[in-house]
Amino acid sequence: MVQVTIWGSLARFTDDAREVEVEAENLRQLLDGLAQKYPGLKPQLERGVSVSIDGRVYNDNWFQPIRPDSEVVLLARLKGG
């Protein structure tokens, strides 16, 4: 299991839980697991989020490995121009 910190406004889609656990070995499994466990979060995940794994932010690197002891943070994807 991977412990995930839910950052900011995304917590409203996890019943205000700021820490959740998901079974995942990579980024794709993490996002799929979150969508399954928290269906209200799925539209946000489909729009795009960023995931910080051990201090490095990933957006679309689906097969980025995640260790059980990794520090994982789910963030709303920042958009700019």
Image (tube, helix red, strand yellow):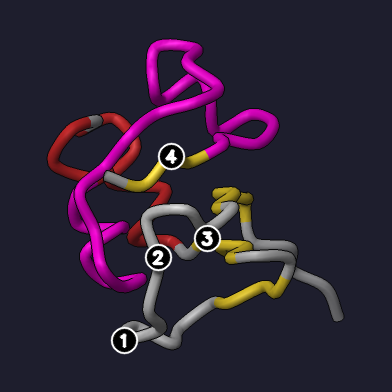
The C terminus, quarter of image: bottom right
* The image quarter in which residue 53 lies: bottom right
* The image quarter in which residue 38 lies: top left
Residue tagged 4 = 3
Residue depth check, mark 1 versus mark 2: number of the one nearer the observer = 2
Residue 2 image offset from top left, x and y in percent = 36, 47
Residue tagged 1 = 63
Residue tagged 2 = 67
- Dot 4: within a 10 Å radius of its alpha carbon, few (fewer than 14), some, or many (20 or more) residues? some
Q: Amino acid at mark 3?
A: Val
Q: Amino acid at mark 1?
A: Phe
Tell me how far mark 2 sits from mark 3, CA to CA: 20 Å
Determine the secondary structure under disc 4: strand
Highlighted range, magenta: 5-33
Q: Amino acid at mark 4?
A: Gln
Q: Is residue 64 above or below residue 13?
A: below
Residue tagged 3 = 49
Q: Is residue 77 above or below residue 20?
A: below
